[in-house]
Image (tube, rainbow, N blue to C red):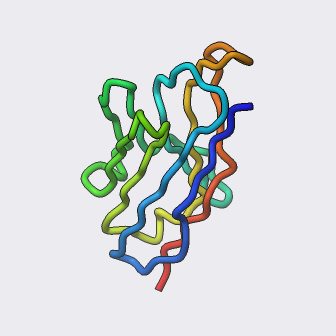
Amino acid sequence: QVQLVESGGGLVQPGGSLRLSCAASGSIFSINAMRWYRQAPGKQRELVAGITSGGMTNYAGSVKGRFTISRDNAKNTVYLQMHSLKPEDTAVYYCNADINSPDRPWSRYWGQGTQVTVSS
């Protein structure tokens, strides 16, 4: 069974940095796009960044220039490097990925989320 597991969240001071990881495991043929979303309390989940299998990236305007999404296809892992963090970046961060597997051809999977808190 395919699973996405995030790690790397935590508490950081404003201006600090964090690196999130999301690893896909299970029986996987291939992975297409991978993305990071976030959801702050009382707000809708929003797309933070995405990356295609070929490495093309896109970012929300609010994080452009501060966050970098990358992936290691050999490890089925996507990363989100976050710099110059602000209190408004506080949220639960989720990854998702479009995965082709023997059980479910080309389905979208979500991770369980990891909390990022930016506070002094």
For residue 113, side relative to residue 47 (left or right): right
Of the pair 89 and 12, the residue shown nearer to us: 12
Q: Residue furthest top?
A: 105
Indicate the quadrant containing the N terminus: top left, top right, bottom left or bottom right: top right
For residue 32, side relative to residue 6 (left or right): left
Q: Quadrant of residue 81?
A: bottom left
Does residue 51 sit above or below 61 in this rendering? above
Task: State the residue at coordinates (32%, 34%).
Answer: 57
Of the pair 67 and 60, the residue shown nearer to us: 67
Does residue 113 sit above or below 37 in this rendering? below
Q: Residue furthest bottom?
A: 120
Find residue 115 and report its horizontal and vertical position in percent: 61, 64
Find residue 43 and report its horizontal and vertical position in percent: 63, 52
Task: State the residue at coordinates (61%, 16%).
Answer: 106
Task: State the residue at coordinates (53%, 65%).
Answer: 90
Find residue 21 and report its horizontal and vertical position in percent: 49, 53
